[in-house]
Structure formats: C-alpha cells, structure tokens
Image (cartoon, helix red, strand yellow):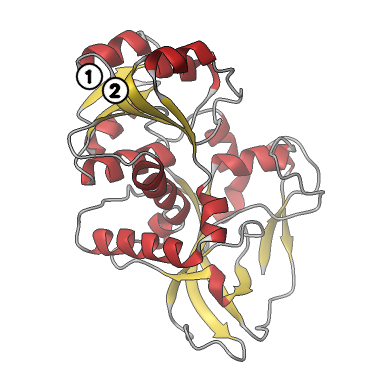
Amino acid sequence: MRVVSCVELGAPEKLVLEERPDLSPLPGHVLVDVKACGVYFVDTLMVQGLYQIRPEPPFVPGGEVAGVVRAVGEGVESFQAGDEVIATPGMNGFAEQVLLPAERIIPKPAGLSFGQASGFYQAYCTAQFALDNRAALQPGETVLVLGAAGGVGLAAIDVAKQMGARVIAAASSEEKLAACRKQGADDVILYSEEDLKLRAKELSGGGVDVVYDPVGGDFSEPALRALAPRGRHLVIGFAGGEIPTVRWNLILLKQCQVVGVDWGGWGSRNRDENTALFDGLAQRVGSGELSPVPPTVYPFEQAAAALRDLMERRVVGKAALEVS
C-alpha cells in the first residue's frame, strides 16, 4: 500500500510517497481500504511541527478517512467486509489502508460520497457539540461564523440553520462568501472591506448571540465586541495562526461568556453521548436536513498540493485526497 509520509518537519513539499506492506487484520480491529482522506488545517500544522501534538518524523498525517471494510479481526461483530465506513485514526490516515480498533470505526451516513464522508465526522460533530452543548443555541438567535467558507465554518452554518438560527458568515473573498450563501447564510461580511464589529452589529440589530470562532488572530476581539449582552463566544481553534489575547474588561462589561470547545476531549470521555450526537447528525443527513458540501478533491499523490492550498487559503470548503 502507499502512504504519504512526513520524513522531515517543514513545508508540505517535503512529504514523500512511500510503498509499505499491506496490513492484516488483528483481533478486535477492522481493516479498511481507504477511498478518501479528509485534509484538515491541523494536518498543515502537524507536518510543520507547529501543532500542540508534535510527533517525531517519520510519521503519516491524516486524522479522518472514509472507505470500505476489507476484513475484520476476531471478536468484531459490529462490522463486516463490504461495509462503507468512516475511520478516525487521529494519525496515519494518509494511507491506502488503515487498521483500527472497532470503536474507531463509524458507519458512513447514507447519501454521502466518500469524499464528503472523509470530512464529515470532525467538522459536523464539532459544530453540533459547540452550538448545542456549549452554546445552548436557541431558534431565532443570531450566530456569527468566522472563517465561514472553510470546512469547519460551512458545517457550522449548516448545523446552525438546521437548529433555527440566523447566520452571519464572515470570509475573506467574494467567492467564499458565495459558498456561504449557498450553504444557507442569511448575511455575509467581507473581512477585507468591512469592519467586522460594526457590520455584525448592524446586521444583527445591535449584537450577535453567538460567535463561532475557529480562526483566532486579529478577528477574535472585534467578534467579541460584536456580541450582545450575555452572548457566547465559542473558541473552536486558531486557524489564523495567532492565539488572541482577550481583554477581560470586555467580558465584564458585556456580561458575556467565552466558551472553550474541545469536542475531541469530550467525545473520548463521553463515548455514549458522542455516539448519540453522531447518530443524530447522520439521521439529519439522511433526511436532507443537513447538506455537507462536496470537497475539493486532489489525487492521493498530490497531498502536498492540498496542504499548500489550505495553508494559503485557496480552498473553499473541505479538501480530500482521492485514493484510486
């Protein structure tokens, strides 16, 4: 099988395509032939040695894939050969095969392509957990989504609209704003030409109820200032590169909440609740209530190009590697 290996920390162009022996099933494990690999911004950080988890080379990046079960090990009864699944290796996903314990395998929601499925689990579970569990979003409330044209942002738009919220999407180009509108955003803000705080307040009639912030950097403070009293600022991540410094007097004066969102940590500690969360999302995909956007697809051997395009903000929505 082929894998994309990080043999040296640095630019994505340092990644190497390697041949390795095929995998064999182990007791309690599921062997999956990968059809598509989800490409996340975190992968760009990991290969550069900039992520909070810093594996030593050589390693294979890639945290989420979709594919078909080739074989199951002794004791596995929940899956069988031929099942279409999502697998969550955390690492080692940029490969033509993955071998994981059965609890790391999830049935692929009906109606999703392998490309869509390879970027569904993390993005949509994070959005659902953040907006429902952490923000307690209510119908009729207004959500400001930062970095709204990325895979995480488009998932947040989709989930927020399905929950009955009004969505204001902020992004960096007209092309990206068009994708946000297509996904259901009610209003949009162009970072490069509009004042984020003033425009968000104007569009929301005085202040937004929830900020969905996977970006950090220079946009976090104006978004915080755009909150209505008792609003909730959800800290999802820092794709902008910089961890912002929050002025605590703003939190006091607005009587707002700055809420950390660690879906991964919560999910690992609350497996039954996380399974129920995912099952609810899968049902809503099947019923047409949620509409994951098809990804920008790259051939498997062009993993470096996919990561480079993500780093330079050229990708609208999700990116995926297609395994032929």
> Where residue 305 sits: x, y (%)?
58, 40
Residue type at tag 2: Val
Q: Identify the residue position indicated by label 2 in the image.
A: 208
View extreme (bottom): residue: 74
Q: Say if residue 16 shows up in the picture.
A: yes
Q: Residue at x 36, y 13 (%)?
A: 196
Left or right: where does residue 235 sit relative to residue 27? Answer: left
Q: Residue at x 36, y 44 (%)?
A: 155
Q: Identify the residue position indicated by label 1 in the image.
A: 204
Disc marking residue 87: none
Residue 284 drawn above or below residue 106? above
Q: Pointers 1 and 2 in contact (CB under 8 A)? A: yes
Q: Quadrant of residue 277?
A: bottom left
Residue 137 drawn above or below residue 265? above
Residue type at tag 1: Ser
> Where residue 120 sits: x, y (%)?
41, 54
Q: Residue at x 54, y 81 (%)?
A: 70
Q: Nearer the viewer, residue 207 or 76?
A: 207
Q: Nearer the viewer, residue 203 or 130?
A: 130
Element assignment for label 1: helix
